[in-house]
Amino acid sequence: MTDENENTEDWRVRAESAEAALSQMQAQMAARVAQAELKAEAVRAGMIDLDGLKLIDVASIRLNQNGEVEDAASLLVRMKREKPWLFGTAVSSSAAATPPRPEPPRSRHANELSHEEWLNARAALIRRR
């Protein structure tokens, strides 16, 4: 009987150890899912550097039954208001560029210059030599 009690005790210890490992793994996976969802929402919100997500208090993150972060968008809106330097502007830098002219700029002929402009252009040419 003592052998049977030891066997039962061994199985109980193993089961408790497996349950503890399982709950630890579930907590890690929930944290990874939350981090991935926050990253996706941060990209949508225009965050420049995703290292800014480290500033979010992990204890304040709640997951719903589907495993999604509750109010992730409002969390990032609040972060954008409190730490605007982590987010880019809504306007793209390429949108501010002016399109090139359809024809190359034409150089002016000496007859089209005023006397002062001609003297300045002549002086610039002489200095280059």
Image (cartoon, rainbow, N blue to C red):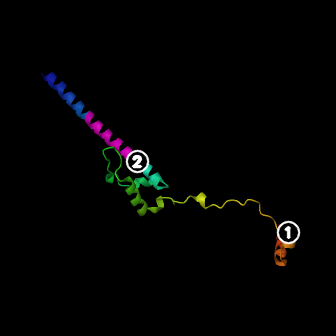
Q: Nearer the viewer, residue 71 or 24?
A: 71
Residue 14, image x, y percentages? 24, 30
Closer to viewer: mark 1 or mark 2: 1
Residue 111, image x, y percentages? 87, 72
- The amino acid type of the residue labelled 2 equals Glu
- The amino acid type of the residue labelled 1 equals His
Is residue 54 positioned above or below 15 on the image? below
Question: Regarding mark 2 in the picture, which secondary structure is present there?
Answer: helix
Majority secondary structure of magenta residues: helix
Label 2, on which residue?
Answer: 37
What residue is shown at x 86% (from left), y 71% (from top)? 110
For the view shown, which residue lies furthest in the front direction? 102
Is residue 122 positioned above or below 30 on the image? below
Name the mark on residue 109.
1
Q: Is residue 35 magenta?
A: yes
In which quadrant is the N terminus drawn? top left
Q: Earlier in the sequence, mark 1 or mark 2?
A: 2
Q: Is 33 left, or right, of 48 in this rendering?
A: left
In magenta, the rendered stretch is 18-37
Q: Is residue 34 magenta?
A: yes
> Mark 1, residues whose alpha carbon is within 10 Å: few (<14), some, or many (≥20)?
few
